[in-house]
Amino acid sequence: MINNIKDVIINNIVNSIINKTFDSSVKIVKTSNKDNKFNHLKKDASYLLYIHIPFCDNLCPFCTFHKYKYDEKKAVKYFENLRKEIHILKNYDIKIDSIYIGGGSPLIHEEEIIKTLKLLKNIFKVEDISCETDPNHIKPTTINNLKGLVKRLSIGIQSFDNDILKELSRFDRFGDKDTLINKIKKIQGILPITNLDLIFNLPNQTKKSLKNDIKIAKELNVEQITTYPLMSSNLNSKFINRFELNKNKENFYNIICDMLEDYHMNNMWSFSKECEEKLNDEYVSTYNEYIGLGSGGFSYLDGNLFVNSYDLDNYENLLNIKKDSTIAKSTFTKKQMIQYYFLCTLFSGSFNIKKYERLFDINLEKYLKKEIFLLKKLDFIYIENEVIYLTKKGKYLLIVVMANFYSKMDKVRAIFKNKIIV
Ligand SMILES: C[S@@+](CC[C@H](N)C(=O)[O-])C[C@H]1O[C@@H](n2cnc3c(N)ncnc32)[C@H](O)[C@@H]1O
Ligand code: SF4
């Protein structure tokens, strides 16, 4: 018990240090018409491409992602503009290794997403394409139409507990536990990889309910299961504050890790059945640099974090005026770039010191001496053959830190959403 309290205190202290580092690193400033994220692309380099589709039929109270209530006319216009941005990117001589289409609900307009996927395939010749969806857009006919276009389909389930689904306002919209299970069974195996998103530490969630969620997900035999901790920020505080804080987060995370012990950990919250398939949900964790297209997309290029316009009209205007939708950016110093890379790489489970030193042409000791000393001393990491690994409590710490990172990004969303900056 005393050990538990000590761990909680240490977690909080380390997390607060990381928070302060984030606050001092991420200084977002408005960009001018001369600033263009594409000018930071390196010829012949390869990148991960993230594409954002900001529409949902209805909005869930817990979700802080950038999205608008669906309107067909607006969505069609948006997809047209998105394809314009894809064509702009085509003019740069770069290679795309992997594409992640997130939302919102990317399958909300089947014809438009398929047109966009075909364009992406045609231009970038990428095999590895992931696409998110809500459970209402996974009819077998739709998923069959995605064959050869999408490799990995990620379905938002959140929980199979009917009471929790009601709290999340998803019971009436997406169906009860049995409906969700049947929907998944009907499309299982059509695409190479099906992922289910679950959330833990939800209001009123019990250990029994969480264990049942994981059990059902395993029985469904999907290739991948992702378990996010409930993330809170000022964008969903109205919903979160209605409930008593669930104090089981670390316990819940340990239950998940134990129950998915026979799975391969892609990163701290994503588990896959196939170890050799390096499936990864968190594009920020595996790729050093990534390009974000679409309204609200983030890019990390050349030590700069770029933010695309949240406003759909402004998104279109900017593409027409300056051939880029960027409205703001934050520029990192070399030390901050190294810290960011360290954090994101460690989130995937291990960190190769030599590879890292070559990449940044630095001596690790010099740049991260304090951080590594502290993490080792507090038993969050251990080092073997010049590779840094996370201990059990280190894995949980990374979950807390990454969730905080996302909450911080919500701050950026809150600042810029609905503000038109040309
Ligand atoms: C952007 S959503 C897209 C999924 C799809 N629209 C749906 O609702 O089924 C991707 C995933 O983010 C996760 N998510 C959304 N809000 C979250 C929050 N506040 N905390 C933790 N995870 C969250 C959910 O698991 C969700 O499935
Ligand atoms: S959880 Fe999915 S459906 Fe709900 S608001 Fe977020 S993106 Fe939209």
Image (spheres, grey):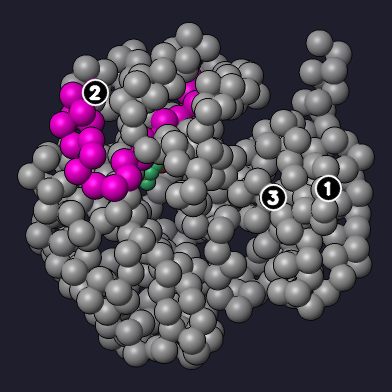
Can residue 254 be seen in the rendering of this structure?
yes
Mark 1 neighbour density, 10 Å: few (under 14) some (14–19) many (20 or more): some
Q: Earlier in the sequence, mark 1 or mark 2?
A: 2
The verdict on residue 39 being magenta is: no
- Mark 3 or mark 2, which has the lower sequence index? 2
Q: Look at the image and say whether residue 201 sits in the magenta stretch.
A: yes
Amino acid type shown at disc 2: Ile
Drawn side of residue 123 relative to residue 93, left or right: left
Q: Look at 56% across and 58% down and name the residue there.
A: 286
First-in-chain label (3 vs 1)? 3
Q: CA distance from mark 1 to mark 2?
A: 42 Å
Q: Amino acid at mark 1?
A: Ile
Q: Which residue is mark 2?
A: 181
Q: Is mark 3 within 8 Å of ligand 1?
A: no
Question: Residue under circle 1?
Answer: 383
Mark 1 vs 2: CB contact within 8 A: no
